[in-house]
Image (cartoon, rainbow, N blue to C red):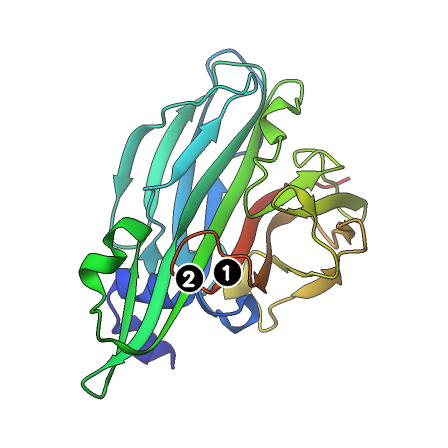
């Protein structure tokens, strides 16, 4: 299976990966800052962005940066520097000129279609504007899904802030209760999961520690949101962690989609006590 997936082109692979349930995705999307808590006046971080089997080891595909959004502590948008995409990863630098917390996100909202044409199975991925031009009008067994994906991480210079953490009210998002750059090993942290700005209840959240390449077990554990969308995570040890959740519903906002799949992914750094 792994060998077969490697034969796919990256764009084709990501189109399929966006439609797979999180637990079925051996490959996961992630952002990895070189540091998440910094001090000083001339402060930079480098961020890797990739899709890989092992967390956080770039061995497979780069995460495309078309939807990259960096929100500064004052809520303004920051332009990343030295942006590039190679065979296994994308990378960019951020100059943290403001004191406070930055939110780094890669956001996408598009359509995925599968259908039959002359007996052959076809897949298509794109935006609502190109759907009618690229998907044949005589396609059979057409199924169209809206895919809303958000991949995030957080970086703080100096005193943590919360202005950049405000949800947008679109898709599946995380509203921190515990600050995302104030996480300690063996200590519980609380978050709230939102869907279109409202509590996302009874959603499974998966958490995996990095470093899978050097152990046999994934170390994955799961929690479930309560009626108010809240959940708690007790980090077993210091390190980098991947968190992911997704929902499927019939509230597609892009035509002609009949269902929506929204996913949220984040990378957190947990410090030792």
Q: Secondary structure at mark 2?
A: loop
Which of the 4 quarters of the picture holds residue 136?
bottom left
Q: Looking at the picture, does residue 186 appear above or below residue 8? A: above
- Which quadrant of the figure contains the C terminus? top right
Q: Residue at x 56, y 35 (%)?
A: 168
Q: Which residue is drawn at the image coordinates 37% and 41% (left, top)? A: 67
> CB atoms at circles 1 and 2 under 8 Å apart?
yes
State the image coordinates of residue 99 (x, y, percent, origin top left).
Answer: 58, 15
Quarter assignment of residue 38: top right
For the question of whether residue 269 can be seen, the reply is yes
Residue 217 image label: none
Work out whether residue 8 or residue 115 is closer to the camera in this orientation and state it: 115
Q: Position of residue 96 (x, y in %)?
A: 48, 19
Q: Which residue is mark 2?
A: 257
Could you tell me residue 147's position as x and y percent?
A: 44, 57
Q: Is residue 194 left or right of residue 140?
A: right
Q: Residue furthest front?
A: 137
Q: Position of residue 223 (x, y in %)?
A: 74, 61
- Mark identifier at residue 260: 1
Q: Residues within 10 Å of mark 2 (few under 14, many from 20)?
A: many
């Amino acid at each position: 299976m792994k060998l077969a997936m490697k034969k796919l082109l990256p764009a084709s692979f990501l189109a399929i990966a966006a439609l797979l349930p999180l637990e079925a995705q051996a490959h996961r999307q992630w952002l990895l800052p070189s540091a998440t808590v910094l001090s000083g006046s001339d402060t930079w971080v480098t961020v890797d962005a990739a899709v890989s089997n092992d967390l956080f080891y770039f061995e497979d595909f780069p995460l495309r940066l078309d939807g990259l959004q960096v929100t500064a502590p004052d809520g303004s948008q920051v332009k990343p520097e030295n942006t590039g995409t190679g065979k296994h990863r994308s990378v960019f630098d951020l100059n943290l000129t403001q004191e406070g917390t930055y939110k780094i996100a890669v956001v996408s909202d598009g359509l995925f279609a599968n259908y039959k044409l002359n007996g052959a199975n076809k897949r298509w991925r794109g935006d609502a504007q190109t759907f009618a031009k690229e998907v044949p009008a005589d396609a059979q067994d057409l199924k169209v899904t809206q895919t809303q994906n958000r991949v995030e991480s957080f970086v703080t210079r100096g005193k943590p802030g919360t202005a950049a953490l405000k949800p947008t009210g679109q898709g599946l998002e995380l509203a921190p209760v515990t600050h995302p750059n104030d996480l300690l090993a063996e200590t519980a942290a609380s978050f709230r999961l939102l869907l279109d700005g409202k509590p996302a209840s009874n959603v499974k959240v998966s958490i995996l520690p990095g470093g899978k390449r050097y152990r046999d077990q994934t170390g994955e554990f799961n929690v479930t949101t309560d009626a108010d969308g809240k959940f708690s995570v007790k980090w077993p040890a210091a390190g980098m962690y991947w968190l992911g959740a997704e929902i499927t519903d019939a509230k597609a906002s892009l035509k002609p989609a009949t269902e929506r799949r929204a996913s949220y992914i984040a990378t957190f750094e947990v410090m030792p006590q």
